[in-house]
Amino acid sequence: MYQEQLSELNPKNVVEHLNFITGDFEPVLMCHCAKTKFCHRHLVAQWLENELGINIMEFNVIDFERKQGYLKKKSVPSLFNEED
């Protein structure tokens, strides 16, 4: 349902509004959710990235990526099969 609400918005207008209200400061999306818990902020960040092609970085979280509202540890490719 949250994705439906986002789809009704114009992402360019959202970013322009965020820039307007933050003035000379870079907009920051914040929450107090635990790193591995679901968070709507991740959905918004992913939506803006997908729609506008911008990169929204997580502060102080290097080895994780956003997936469907969660932060997931980035998988490291292996030369070996997990079954071996």
Image (cartoon, rainbow, N blue to C red):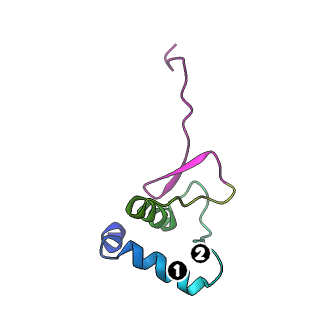
Residue 59 in magenta stretch: no
Query: Tag 1's secondary structure?
Result: helix
Disc on the earlier residue, 2 or 1: 1
Residue drawn where x is 62% and y is 69% of the image:
32
Q: Residue furthest front?
A: 24
Is residue 68 placed above or below 78 in the rendered structure?
below
Residue flagged by tag 2: what amino acid is it?
A: Pro
Q: Position of residue 29 (x, y in %)?
A: 57, 71
Spatial distance from mark 2 to mark 1, Cα to Cα? 6 Å
Residue under numbered circle 2: 27
Circles 2 and 1: CB distance less than 8 Å?
Answer: yes
Query: Tag 2's secondary structure?
Result: loop
Near mark 2 (Cα within 10 A), the count class, few <14, some 14-19 or many ≥20, is: some
Residue drawn where x is 48% and y is 83% of the image:
17
Could you say which is closer to the camera, residue 83 or residue 30? 30
Q: Residue furthest right?
A: 60
Near mark 1 (Cα within 10 A), the count class, few <14, some 14-19 or many ≥20, is: some
Residue under numbered circle 1: 18
Q: Position of residue 83 (x, y in %)?
A: 49, 17
Question: Is residue 50 toward the left or the right of residue 20 in the image?
Answer: left
Residue 74 in magenta stretch: yes
Q: Which residues are magenta?
A: 61-84
Number of disc labels: 2
For residue 61, the mark is: none
Q: Position of residue 78 (x, y in %)?
A: 55, 23
Residue drawn where x is 51% and y is 20% of the image:
82
Q: Residue furthest top?
A: 84
Is residue 50 placed above or below 30 in the rendered structure?
above
